[in-house]
Each structure stands twice: as C-alpha cells, then as structure tokens.
Image (tube, rainbow, N blue to C red):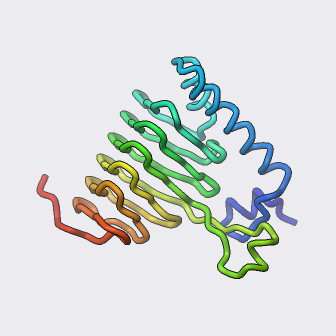
Amino acid sequence: MLTEREKMLSGLPYDSRDGELIKLRKKAREICGRYQSQYSQGHLQHVLQLMAAFGSQCYLEPGIQLDYGCHIHIGDRFYANFNCIFLDSAPIRIGNDVLLGPGVQLITSSHPLQPSSRLSGEQSCLPINIGNNVWIGANAVILPGVCIEDNAVVAAGAVVTQDVSAGTLVAGVPAIMKKALIS
C-alpha cells in the first residue's frame, strides 16, 4: 500500500493531513521563518538545502515560502524576489537564468471541486516545469501542470493555466499569448 507521500508524488489523490506530510511542511515553514526573521546567508543556505537540487548563484529574497522544499529543482543563476511561494506537493523544476518577480506563486497542488472530497482532506497535484531564461513578473500565479518553455516571459499579475511556448509573452487572467519575442 502506498503512503500518502508516495500517492502525492505519483499524481494520485492523497490526504494532505497525513502525519509525515505535516511534519515535512512544518520543517520547511520553520526554516523559511528563520530566514524571514533573521535574514542571513547562513539561513538562506538552510532554505536551499531543503531543496532537491539547486545550482550555483541562486538567491532567494526573504519572505520565501516553501510547502516542502524537497521537491524543488533549481538551475544556475536563479533569482526570486521578495515573498515568492512554492507549493511543491509535486516537483517544481526550474532551469538556468530564471527570474521571479515579487509575490510569484508556483502552485502544484489543487483541491477537489466536490465539497465532500475537500472535507476529507483530499488533494491532488501536478508538476510545474520552467525552462531556461524565463522571466515571471510580479504577482504572477503558475497553476498545476504548467510548462513554461525557454525564453518565455509571463507578465505581472498573470494567472497561467496552460503551457507557455518558447519565446512568447503571456499576460492576463487567464494568461494568453500576447506576442512572440524576438531574441
């Protein structure tokens, strides 16, 4: 029989109130909280060490919130501005040279539409993949299952519900392609 964490990572519905999952979330919140309240390079290193992988020259401004941290993979030269949120129930994979504006939310988890299922604590999740040289503007929200390809730009305030093609600008709620970008 699969554990709730194994169900979560395989994309099956899972119980978010499971003890192991609560313990992992609590650890991530405590480490992020220390970085927020006592901003230092040492506390940043603790946040980065929660992650499955992180490249060189990664920097996260204070206010970062991770659901678990251990399902996040980040490439080189990554920057996250203030108050970004990573709900990493499923893997979040981020390429090289990616910039996140303040308040960006990467959300892999979702709740069911049926009230009885929500009351049971059931959740589901899908991974988020972000390519190389991507810029995501302030307060953009990236929803479960989205893939943002290389050299794309997500405008500030966009809610991304579908994949974003390489070299395009998307904006709006829900986000739609506004134009192809010339490199």
| Quadrant housing residue 13 | bottom right
Is residue 35 placed above or below 28 in the rendered structure?
above
Q: Nearer the viewer, residue 65 or 92?
A: 65
On the image, the x and y values in percent for residue 150 come to: 30, 54
Task: Name the residue: 54% across, 25% down.
Answer: 44
Q: Nearer the viewer, residue 94 or 79?
A: 79
On the image, the x and y values in percent for residue 72 come to: 56, 45
Task: Name the residue: 16% across, 59% down.
Answer: 181
Is residue 84 placed above or below 177 in the rendered structure?
above
| Quadrant housing residue 57 | top left
Q: Quadrant of the N terminus?
A: bottom right
On the image, the x and y values in percent for residue 60 come to: 46, 33
Is residue 115 placed above or below 126 in the rendered structure?
below
On the image, the x and y values in percent for residue 48 come to: 56, 31
| Quadrant housing residue 152 | bottom left
Task: Name the residue: 73% across, 36% down.
Answer: 27
State how many labels appear.
0
Left or right, 69 with respect to 147, comes to: right
Task: Name the residue: 29% across, 46% down.
Answer: 133
